[in-house]
Amino acid sequence: MDKKKIHLFYGVFLVAVGLGVFYRIPQIMPQVAAIEFFSQKQGVLKACFYLLGIFLITAGGIRIYKNYK
């Protein structure tokens, strides 16, 4: 495979992982809240996970956009 296809697949993979993060956050947060250390920091932790998802989707979108530019 050439480099262009690899970058396209990597971009699609990053977007898929970012969407997976958004999908899993509501399912995982009750389990994380059960841990005593994280129970008081749940808002910050949720914001960090959503920020991670946004970064992954943005990075994948940039790779896909640059591939077709």
Image: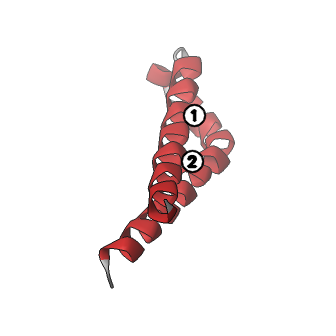
Q: Could you say where residue 11 lies in the image, as x and y percent from the top left?
A: 46, 60
Name the one closer to the observer, 69 or 54: 69
Q: Are marks 2 and 1 in contact (CB under 8 Å)?
A: yes
Spot occupied by residue 63 in the image (x, y as percentages of width and height):
44, 56
- Cα–Cα span, label 2 and label 1: 8 Å
Q: Secondary structure at mark 1?
A: helix
Label 2 amino acid? Val
Query: In the drawing, does residue 33 fall left or right of residue 55?
Result: right
Q: Reply above or below: 19 against 52.
A: below
Give the quarter of the image for residue 8: bottom left
Q: Quadrant of residue 47?
A: top right
- Can residue 33 be seen here? The reply is yes
Horizontal side, residue 11 vs residue 28: left or right: left
**What residue is shown at x 37% (from left), y 72% (from top)?**
4
Mark before the other along the chain sequence, 2 or 1: 2
Name the residue located 48 percent from the left edge and 49 percent from the top edge.
Answer: 62
Label ID, residue 21:
2
**Left or right: 52, with 20 as reference point:** left
Q: Above or below — where is 41 with respect to 45?
A: above
Amino acid type of the residue that numbered disc 1 sits on in the rendered structure: Tyr
Q: Residue at x 55, y 38 (%)?
A: 54
Q: How is the structure coloured here?
A: secondary structure
Crowding at mark 1 (Cα within 10 Å: few <14, some 14-19, many 20+):
some
Q: Which residue is mark 1?
A: 50
